[in-house]
Image (cartoon, grey):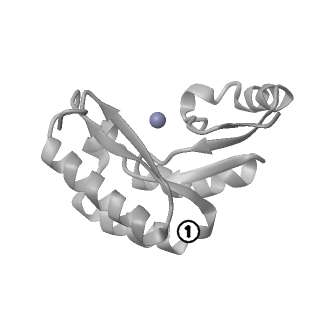
Amino acid sequence: MQFIDSHCHLDFTEFDSNRESLISECVAKGVEQFVVPGISLAQSRALLEFKINFAGVKIAAGLHPYFLNQHQESHIEQLFTFATANKNQLVAIGECGLDRSIENLSKQTFLFEQQIALANQLGLPLIVHHRQSHDL
Ligand SMILES: [Zn+2]
């Protein structure tokens, strides 16, 4: 049986010391593909290079609400441009969504709605993060 890890942040520095062995161990146990979400504009761009280095890694591009302070107003427009230009490299838009533990829900909502529109425009799935946001 083949497995796909549909959401793993393998590019995070926490995995710098054992990333290759971890991926090899997963592959040995049948996990053949890994979807690594985007969390910021810069990191989404960097995932293009990350993907090249690891067979089986699929990537998404997005602005994660947990990293809201890193997202500037211009980033959503740049994300549209980046994702459109690299659509064939992406399997989804995200990770995006709403997180009540983070302040500024209006900015989060704006970015979330924009990324929903982007996913619709490109015909890509959306990776959604939500924390305590069911009633919003
Ligand atoms: Zn995540």
Query: Could you tell me residue 106's position as x and y percent?
Result: 13, 47
Identity, as a three-letter code, of the amino acid under mark 1: Lys
Left or right: 105, with 99 as reference point: left
Q: Nearer the viewer, residue 117 or 56?
A: 117
Q: Could you tell me which residue is drawn at 78 percent across and 47 percent down? A: 55
Q: Residues within 10 Å of mark 1 (few under 14, many from 20)?
A: some
Query: Could you tell me residue 81's position as x and y percent?
Result: 42, 72
Q: Quadrant of the N terminus?
A: top right
Query: Could you tell me residue 123's position as x and y percent?
Result: 49, 67
Q: Which of the 4 image quadrants contains residue 11?
A: top right
Q: Could you tell me which residue is drawn at 79 percent across and 37 percent down? A: 2
Query: Could you tell me residue 24's position as x and y percent?
Result: 81, 31
Q: Secondary structure at mark 1?
A: helix
Task: Confirm or reject: label 1 Cβ below 8 Å from ligand 1.
Answer: no
Q: Quickly name the residue at label 1.
A: 87
Q: Could you tell me which residue is drawn at 27 percent across and 40 percent down? A: 98
